[in-house]
Image (cartoon, rainbow, N blue to C red):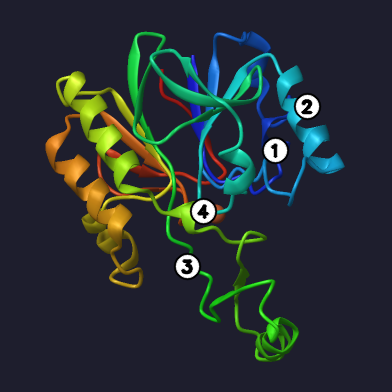
Amino acid sequence: MIYVTGDCHGDFERLNQTIFPEQKEMTKDDYVIICGDVGGVWNRGAESRREKWWMDWLQERSFTTLFVDGNHENFDRLDAYPAEEWHGGLVHKIRPSMIHLMRGQVFDLDGSKIFAFGGARSHDIDGGILELDDPQFELKKKQLDRGWRPYRINHLSWWERELPSEAEMEEGRKNLERNGNQVDFIISHCCASSTQVLLSHGMFKPDILTAYLEEIRQTVQFKKWFFGHYHENRNVNREEILIYEQIIRIS
Ligand SMILES: [Fe+2]
């Protein structure tokens, strides 16, 4: 069995037995995939007590949790986990059964091919990105707080790595080509440029990642594409599904 859900932001309550009783029938060979903004690896420097509690709790579930990264993950820490091969693609294992699906990888799960590509541009940064070592940090922060303007702090609540590198995008192209540009499912945090237009009527601007995903959308055959980021449950069309708190079985 494979289930999919959306952004968690460090709160995995929806995966408890009351809200998600299906897990009673699941084993570690069954999967729940989170479409980014997982927030399980978030704290600066090392795992916080809260994070450790949740990661251990997920490890104790009957199923295996998989995730692509969103824009709200601590990429300094996520990138520090060793990359290992798992079901045909590269992963970071946060726990033996809490697993980060790295960008541009194709996985074979239960006979289903899954293309994973995390990341997204942060939308809530109208006030800009502050640097901790900026001598004017406190002053700038105070001004932004006073004006209620959303901002992020580099390496504390924002990472340049939220957007992909050229190498990650190329890795994705190569792996898809190797699979005849055909997969069963695409799992991402962000979506293709044209999908974003349909969703937001132009409110969100295209960027390097939405353009890349547009290229994927036009060159790859897929059955369903699930993504998070926009905090809504909505079928954009027959194939592309924006998911938030819902937990949907896809296989
Ligand atoms: Fe989010």
* Amino acid bearing label 2: Trp
Give the camera-side residue of 138 and 37: 138
Residue at mark 4: 71
> In this orientation, does residue 23 appear?
yes
Mark in the foreground, 4 or 1: 4
Image quadrant in which you'd find residue 156: bottom right
Residue sitting at 21 percent across and 40 percent down?
A: 216
Please give left or right for residue 217 compared with residue 9 in the image: left
* Amino acid bearing label 1: Phe
Rounded to the nearest angstrom, the CA distance separating label 2 from label 1 is 9 Å
First in sequence, mark 1 or 3: give its number: 1
First in sequence, mark 3 or 4: give its number: 4
State yes or no: discs 1 and 3 in contact (Cβ < 8 Å).
no
Local SS, label 3: loop
Crowding around mark 2 (Cα neighbors within 10 Å: few <14, some 14 to 19, many 20+) is few
Give the camera-side residue of 220 and 17: 220
First in sequence, mark 4 or 2: give its number: 2
Rounded to the nearest angstrom, the CA distance separating label 1 from label 3 is 23 Å
State yes or no: discs 3 and 4 in contact (Cβ < 8 Å).
no
Please give left or right for residue 128 compared with residue 145 in the image: left
Local SS, label 2: helix
Rounded to the nearest angstrom, the CA distance separating label 3 from label 2 is 31 Å
Residue at mark 1: 12
Please give left or right for residue 132 compared with residue 250 in the image: right
Mark in the foreground, 4 or 2: 4
Q: Which disc, if any, is residue 123?
A: 3
* Amino acid bearing label 3: His
